[in-house]
């Protein structure tokens, strides 16, 4: 009888689960594939560290512990679900070997208790601490899920307690259930039946609830982590555009739900609304409408809605502005803080850039002030400011500089000056400092002069993939033809593009950032510092050097060589806060309650340092502007300039 | 040889450009006449005569104001047909361009714009490449040669002569009148649009707040210019975004750009580097804007700008 | 409404221009662009046809490279392009240019011709009105706003101290001031669509226009270094600025 009931309930639950999952499964199956099968070892490694080890969750200690208790608890408790089903058929049945092993009974008892502790911590966080990262999350749903989890483990513990009372299980191995067994007597058979059924029914109800809930992450998180991008997060997935090819192959980013890739959909179904991304987002922190969490939630709700009865039609509805507003899409600085923070490796930045690709390439819809940048980059002079290409060497002055001419032998290092480094008065100082230092160290180097053009980074982050592709192909051809093997760049954005994105266009280059080369030259004693600089300095990590590319130590090593006393900002290294210029935001006007550069500069100022060291011209301009706007005496200078002052003067 | 100066006139008399051109016409030799079309023409004849016009073809008809360009071009074409002058000198203004351009279609003769000098009656020079090179051009083909001369290319000096006024009938057929002015709006309060202004006075971070923009307003009003701002001033909330000049704001190409308290960040420079002349007023002599300026003034903007406004008013008034 | 937009392909607007041995501006070299000053008028024309129907045709005269300028106009939304290119047109003056444009316009129906106020490379600024005169149609220069009305157009013309409103019969020619509109940035879809739009190439013989040279450069000399680039301070600074304003003709 019980067996029939169990089979019926089980069949019903599974059927409901499958039915409810069908729409989302179909959506993902029909979606564009994401080519993410390279380096399986790295992917498997992430499953170990990030899923089983909960690495990214532990970036926040207490919430991390909370989640780990519940997650590990459920891993351990999986066999108990089978155990419950067996016991439903016959109370004497249990798992072979495990069912009576005292160590297993102990482990179950312990982890069930830890889950309760985890739930308690979760409620304490949500109801008492109430962190801002939950703003906009579905709090009620989270409460229901937590209570269900609690119910699952409480019924488990009580069922185990009743079994101990009935003499079916070993109480000595289960301290908690053993203590609870006092609630029952040897005649509590009915209670035991009710508890085991309750436990299983709650588990099955939870299963049927999953497909349409944010808790679906227990199924999607592991694959989502597996299919996450390998390598530096600064590399955007290229989208080849062949205007000569067949029209049906042409795609301009993501316009509708139907354009989202498998990974992008999986991202949406993996979000638990934990808000860690929102917590670190520079746009959200400065009162702008963009929150990476809300972006993902809004896209998910749109996609989920589209899979209803009229799914076909709604799939064609534009994601912008139906799901997210234009402003949200343009607020992103692509700093990658959200991606780095996300425990389940949601790739917010790639999706935002994909949305921008559609807006720019298909619809020509973007903040109009950024048009000048695109015109400048695509125009005859190929730089965001539209400055004459012939003036790329305007910074040289009396510094001995070799301009590499076609046909000449390539130098050991090609110095990629970058547009800011060539045209912006502040960045030019960095360029000059690096040039002097390379000369002082006797490095064999040269520049391309007027043959250099924008790498295409601002166009690409803006969504103009085609313009980027043209520039990438052109620059790769120039570099290849010139026989260049090693490149040094002062701009973190140029560095990232040359190092991580140009390989997709055939470049075989060894790219170093100027801080790396300078730190190397210092270590080799090819540069000798006086070490006599006085004062305190705080280093601001550029997103595209630090977080996106893991270069944290080289700039700090160079600063150590100057003699300046270093002090760190609260948000440093991987958790550095953007200057506000990335993602082509340099070329757009900023809205919101506060400006990102002012916010970051205030953090730097709060360290008490008298100099803010930067390692990227964008950061330089943004933070220096903030310093001037505030009338602050704090100096903003590139690491290279600080080194040059301690080396040559 | 006969040279005609196409004089721009108004109720207050002839435009300075007409007197400059007459002075040049005298130097070229031969007969000199002026053509003055529009209200104030007859009244201007005396001054035109005093600067060398022996004859002034004049009409005070309001039709020339009502139908700018086309009416004057038609009457002028008839006059040219009747008197066959060799050379016509126009002021290089938007109004005279419209007349000269239409006239050229009728005469089918050569036209030279932006001339800075006429070494001879059949030769003109002009500056190219932002004034870095001077080109001399031989004007060939049949007469009359039409030359538009940049204002202030010559200094006007009187000859002490008097002109014979030859009244001209403003007989313009209906189908040659073209567009008609139906309303005139002076925007004295707000001045010209930033993009169109001949003079732009722009303020930056050096102003220190919203209030000092009033001294820029005064200067702009005195020179008939418009007020702009750098991004720093806009970001600080001192003036609205509509004032912003630069990469993410407006691009301006005025005759004179006066940068007040602006350091000259690239973001700003990209929006104003096309200005013909750049004046920078800044406390810091090392500011990047000083490298760009034709005239850089190091000093306190709060004393210099009001003093400049006074001086402009004094010169304009005299 | 059919609008013809005159466009010019100019050498790199922010590059360093060069003269050839014949004293003519070097117009090829691959780094030219559609004159930025033309985009305002193009935008105005596109908005007019988008609102009231009809189409925009971009007309240009120049070397073969100038096809890129017409392509840009097509990418922005013009429906067809016409490029007049002929070796005999090298060094053509304002009148020949105007005759060519008038001949093109005269060969097809139009309601409006739009041009920029002046080109970025030549600054002559008379060609559009010469075209209007050749066609015998009214013209309004320095237009900042234009709306079609029952008997033609209601036009706002920028003046020194404000603006005039003009009543203008159709068909007409207008030149548009910089900043009158905000030119669109062509989408990639627009660029692709432009490739399949018709572009007609015409030679002088097709138009019955003869090229005549009435101007010849006889000498190019370097200008004396500008008195600018000077940094002053002190009491006469104000007078120096006022002198500069006087020189510039603004006082």
Image (cartoon, coloured by chain):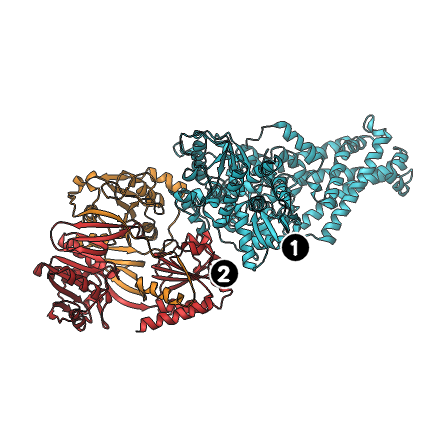
Q: Which mark lies nearer to you, 1 or 2?
A: 1
Q: Is residue A168 visible?
A: yes
| Mark 2 closeness class: few <14, some 14–19, many ≥20 residues within 10 Å | many
Residue A354 location, x and y as percent? 51, 41
* Circle on res. B205: 2
Along the line of sight, the residue nearer the viewer: A515 or C5: A515
Q: Chain of mark 2?
A: B
Q: In this orientation, which residue lies closer to the viewer: B314 or B250?
A: B314
Residue A293 x/y as whole percent: 61, 46
Percent across and percent down for residue A292 are 59, 46
| Front in this rendered view, residue A255 or A94 | A255
Which label sits on residue C115? none
- Residue C90 found in image quarter: top left
Q: Are marks 1 and 2 on the same chain?
A: no
Give the letter of the orange chain.
C
Give the answer, above or below, for where B285 lies relative to A309. Answer: below
Question: Do labels 1 and 2 touch, CB within 8 Å?
Answer: no
Q: Chain of mark 1?
A: A
Identify the residue position indicated by label 1 in the image. A608
Question: Which of the 4 image quarters holds residue C84?
Answer: top left
Disc 2 secondary structure class: helix
Residue sitting at x 85%, y 29%: A101
Q: Which chain is red?
A: B
Of residue C121 and residue C137, the one placed in the foreground of this image is: C121
Spatial distance from mark 1 to mark 2, Cα to Cα? 25 Å
Name the element at disc 1: loop
| Chain A painted colour | cyan
């Amino acid at each position: 009888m019980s067996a029939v009931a169990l089979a019926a309930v089980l069949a019903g639950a599974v059927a409901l689960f499958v039915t409810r999952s069908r729409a989302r499964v179909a959506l993902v199956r029909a979606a564009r594939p994401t080519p993410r099968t390279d380096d399986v070892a790295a992917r498997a490694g992430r499953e170990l560290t990030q899923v089983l080890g909960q690495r990214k969750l532990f970036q926040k200690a207490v919430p991390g512990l909370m989640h780990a208790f519940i997650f590990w608890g459920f891993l351990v408790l999986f066999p108990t679900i089978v155990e419950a089903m067996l016991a439903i058929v016959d109370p004497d049945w249990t798992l072979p070997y495990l069912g009576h092993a005292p160590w297993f009974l102990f482990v179950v008892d312990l982890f069930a208790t830890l889950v309760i502790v985890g739930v308690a911590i979760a409620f304490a966080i949500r109801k008492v601490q109430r962190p801002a990262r939950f703003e906009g999350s579905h709090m009620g749903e989270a409460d229901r899920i937590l209570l269900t989890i609690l119910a699952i483990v409480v019924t488990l513990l009580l069922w185990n307690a009743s079994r101990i009372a009935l003499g079916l299980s070993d109480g000595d191995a289960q301290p908690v259930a053993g203590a609870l067994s006092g609630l029952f007597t040897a005649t509590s058979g009915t209670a035991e039946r009710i508890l085991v059924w309750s436990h299983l029914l709650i588990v099955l109800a939870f299963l049927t609830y999953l497909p349409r809930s944010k808790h679906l992450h227990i199924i999607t998180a592991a694959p989502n982590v597996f299919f996450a991008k390998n390598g530096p997060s600064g590399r955007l997935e290229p989208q080849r555009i062949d205007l000569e090819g067949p029209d049906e192959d042409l795609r301009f980013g993501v316009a509708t739900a139907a354009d989202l890739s498998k990974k992008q959909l999986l991202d949406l179904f993996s979000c638990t609304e934990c808000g860690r991304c929102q917590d670190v987002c520079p746009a959200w922190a400065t009162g702008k409408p963009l929150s990476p969490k809300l972006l993902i939630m809004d896209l998910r709700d749109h996609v989920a809605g589209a899979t209803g009865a009229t799914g076909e039609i709604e799939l064609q509805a534009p994601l912008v502005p139906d799901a997210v507003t234009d402003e949200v899409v343009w607020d992103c600085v692509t700093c990658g803080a959200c991606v780095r923070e996300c425990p389940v490796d949601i790739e917010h930045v790639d999706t935002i850039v994909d949305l921008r690709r559609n807006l720019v390439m298909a619809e020509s819809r973007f903040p109009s002030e950024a048009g000048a940048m695109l015109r400048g980059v695509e125009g005859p002079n190929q730089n965001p400011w539209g400055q004459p290409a012939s003036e790329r060497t305007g910074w040289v002055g009396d510094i001995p500089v070799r301009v590499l001419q076609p046909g000449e032998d390539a130098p050991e290092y090609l110095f990629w000056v970058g547009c800011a480094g060539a045209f912006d008065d502040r960045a030019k100082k960095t360029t000059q400092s690096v040039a002097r230092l390379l000369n002082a160290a006797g490095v064999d180097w040269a520049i391309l002069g007027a043959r250099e053009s924008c790498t295409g980074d601002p166009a690409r982050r803006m969504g103009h993939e085609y313009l980027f592709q043209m520039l990438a192909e052109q620059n790769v051809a120039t570099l290849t033809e010139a026989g260049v093997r090693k490149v040094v760049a002062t701009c973190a954005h140029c560095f990232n593009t040359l190092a991580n994105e140009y390989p997709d266009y055939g470049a075989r280059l060894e790219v170093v950032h100027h801080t790396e080369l300078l730190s190397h030259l210092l270590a080799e004693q090819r540069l000798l510092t006086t070490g006599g600089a006085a004062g305190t300095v705080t280093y601001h990590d550029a997103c595209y050097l630090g977080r996106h590319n893991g270069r944290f130590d080289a700039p700090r090593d160079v600063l150590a060589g100057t003699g300046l006393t270093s002090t760190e900002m609260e948000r440093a290294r991987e958790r550095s806060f953007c200057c506000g210029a990335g993602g082509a935001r340099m070329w757009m006007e900023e809205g919101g309650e506060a400006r990102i550069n002012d916010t970051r500069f205030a953090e730097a100022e709060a360290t008490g340092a008298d100099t803010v060291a930067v390692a990227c011209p964008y950061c330089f301009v943004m933070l220096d502007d903030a310093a001037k706007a505030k009338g602050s005496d704090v100096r903003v200078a590139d690491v290279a300039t600080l080194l040059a002052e301690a080396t040559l003067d | 040889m006969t040279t005609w100066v196409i004089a721009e006139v108004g109720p207050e008399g002839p435009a300075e450009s007409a007197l400059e051109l007459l002075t040049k016409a005298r130097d070229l030799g031969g007969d000199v006449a002026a053509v003055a079309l529009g209200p104030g023409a007859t009244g201007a004849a005396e001054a035109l005569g005093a600067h060398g016009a022996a004859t002034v073809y004049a009409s005070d008809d309001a039709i020339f104001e009502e139908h700018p360009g086309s009416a004057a071009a038609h009457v002028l074409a008839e006059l040219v047909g009747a008197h066959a002058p060799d050379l016509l000198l126009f002021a290089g203004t938007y109004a005279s361009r419209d007349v000269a351009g239409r006239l050229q279609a009728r005469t089918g003769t050569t036209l030279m714009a932006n001339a800075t000098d006429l070494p001879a009656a059949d030769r003109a020079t002009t500056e190219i490449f932002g004034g870095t090179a001077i080109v001399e051009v031989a004007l060939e083909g049949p007469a009359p040669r039409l030359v538009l001369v940049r204002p202030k290319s010559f200094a006007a000096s009187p000859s002490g002569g008097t002109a014979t006024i030859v009244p001209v009938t403003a007989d313009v057929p209906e189908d040659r009148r073209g567009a008609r002015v139906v309303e005139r709006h002076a925007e004295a309060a707000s001045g010209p649009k930033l993009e169109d202004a001949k003079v732009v006075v722009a303020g930056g971070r050096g102003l220190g707040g919203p209030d000092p923009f009033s001294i820029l307003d005064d200067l702009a009003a005195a020179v008939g210019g418009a007020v702009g701002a750098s991004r720093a001033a806009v970001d600080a909330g001192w003036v609205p975004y509509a004032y912003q000049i630069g990469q993410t704001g407006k691009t301006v190409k005025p005759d004179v750009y006066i940068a007040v308290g602006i350091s000259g960040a690239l973001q700003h420079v990209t929006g104003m580097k096309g200005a013909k002349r750049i004046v920078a007023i800044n406390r810091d002599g090392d500011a990047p804007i000083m490298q760009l300026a034709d005239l850089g003034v190091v000093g306190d903007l709060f004393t210099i700008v009001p003093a400049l406004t006074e001086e402009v008013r004094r010169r304009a008034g005299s | 409404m059919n609008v013809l937009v005159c466009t010019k392909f100019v050498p790199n607007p922010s590059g360093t221009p060069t003269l050839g041995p014949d004293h003519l501006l070097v117009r090829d070299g691959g780094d030219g662009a559609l004159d930025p000053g033309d985009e305002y008028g193009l935008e105005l024309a596109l908005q007019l046809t988008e609102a009231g129907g009809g189409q925009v045709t971009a007309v240009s005269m120049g070397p073969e490279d100038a096809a890129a300028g017409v392509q840009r106009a097509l990418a922005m939304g013009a429906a067809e392009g016409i490029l007049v290119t002929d070796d005999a047109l090298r060094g053509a003056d304002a009148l020949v240019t105007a005759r060519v444009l008038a001949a093109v316009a005269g060969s097809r129906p139009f309601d409006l011709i739009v041009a920029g106020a002046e080109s970025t490379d030549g600054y002559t600024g008379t060609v559009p009105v010469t075209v209007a005169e050749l066609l015998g149609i009214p013209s309004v220069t320095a237009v900042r706003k234009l709306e079609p009305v029952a008997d033609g157009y209601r036009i706002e013309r920028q003046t020194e101290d404000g603006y005039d409103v003009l009543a203008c019969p159709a068909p007409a020619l207008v030149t548009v001031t910089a900043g009158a509109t905000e030119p669109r940035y062509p989408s990639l879809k627009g660029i692709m669509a432009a490739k399949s739009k018709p572009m007609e190439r015409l030679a002088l013989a097709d138009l019955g226009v003869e090229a005549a040279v009435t101007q010849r450069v006889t000498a190019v000399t370097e200008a004396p270094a500008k008195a600018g680039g000077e940094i002053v301070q002190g009491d006469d600074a104000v007078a120096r600025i006022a002198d500069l304003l006087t020189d510039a003709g603004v006082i």
